[in-house]
Amino acid sequence: GDSVTQMEGPVTLSEEAFLTINCTYTATGYPSLFWYVQYPGEGLQLLLKATKADDKGSNKGFEATYRKETTSFHLEKGSVQVSDSAVYFCARLNNAGNMLTFGGGTRLMVKP
Amino acid sequence: DGGITQSPKYLFRKEGQNVTLSCEQNLNHDAMYWYRQDPGQGLRLIYYSQIVNDFQKGDIAEGYSVSREKKESFPLTVTSAQKNPTAFYLCASSDVGTGTNYGYTFGSGTRLTVV
């Protein structure tokens, strides 16, 4: 079945460091891919998405590229801020287009 | 503004009580979902509904019940049969069947605590 695997956290970085959070997905079809962010005590917010191979989603300095050949959708940011501290979830849409499968989430902690 | 509203934000339940969590959306989305999140954990699907008057069990439906009488509303009841209900509950909706893949819109969650 559909699955999404994320690197386990927590990821601890200093401010202005480069961020990569790895995400891979099962390659049944060509699913739309998403990154969501969850700040403490809140729901999930859509961060970015990509709907086809080689698409790059971007928002708030975060980027992720849909890599069909490696079935990956890694999240990157060139210079993290303390305010980026949150839990990040990778997700894929099923082929029917009506259900998301989430990865287990990766907690990011950014220290000043 | 369109969105999805969960209430209450905090809820306390005594042992043996049923409680109902509210989820309302004004996005005109067909599909709605309930997830449970335990501390430091990912999301687990409880129930989902693709259309009014129809819903399906997710991975952890035991001890929970739902209804979908209106498109806008998808309340979740945590029954006394749920032995460990303390968790953060998230409701989401999505616009399926339109060919646009915007993923889910989430509410801000309800934190349920058994006292």
Image: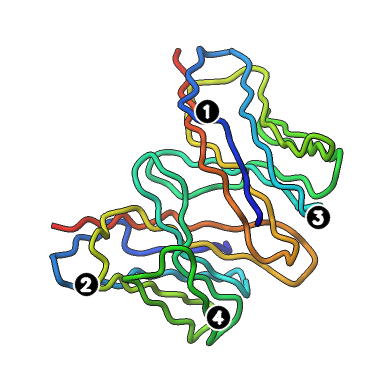
On the same chain, marks 4 and 2? The answer is yes
Amino acid marked by disc 4: Lys
Task: Please report, as a chain letter, where disc 2 is located.
Answer: B
The CA span between labels 4 and 2 is 27 Å
Front tag of 4 and 2? 2
Front tag of 3 and 2? 3
Amino acid marked by disc 2: Ser
Task: Please report, as a chain letter, where disc 4 is located.
Answer: B
Q: Residue furthest front?
A: A1
The CA span between labels 3 and 4 is 30 Å
Front tag of 2 and 1? 2
Q: Residue at x 73, y 36 (%)?
A: A72
Question: In this figure, which residue is indicated by the disc labeled 4?
Answer: B71
The CA span between labels 1 and 4 is 35 Å
Q: Judging from the image, what secondary structure is the residue with disc 1 in?
A: helix
Circle 2 crowding by C-alpha within 10 Å: few under 14, some 14–19, many from 20: some
Q: Is residue A72 left or right of residue A39?
A: right
On the same chain, marks 1 and 4? The answer is no
Question: In this figure, which residue is indicated by the disc labeled 1?
Answer: A84
- Tell me: residue A42, above or below residue A106: below
Q: Residue at x 62, y 71 (%)?
A: B29
Q: Of the numbered discs in the image, which one, if any, rests on residue A23?
A: none
Q: Of the numbered discs in the image, which one, if any, rests on residue B80?
A: 2
Q: Is residue A4 left or right of residue B113?
A: right
Q: Quadrant of residue B6?
A: bottom left
Q: Of the numbered discs in the image, which one, if any, rests on residue A29?
A: 3
Sequence-wise, the earlier of marks 3 and 1 is 3
From the viewer's side, name the closer residue of B27 and A109. A109
Amino acid marked by disc 3: Gly
Q: Judging from the image, what secondary structure is the residue with disc 3 in?
A: loop
Image coordinates of residue A4 in percent, x first then y, are: 62, 45
From the viewer's side, name the closer residue of B54 and B98. B54
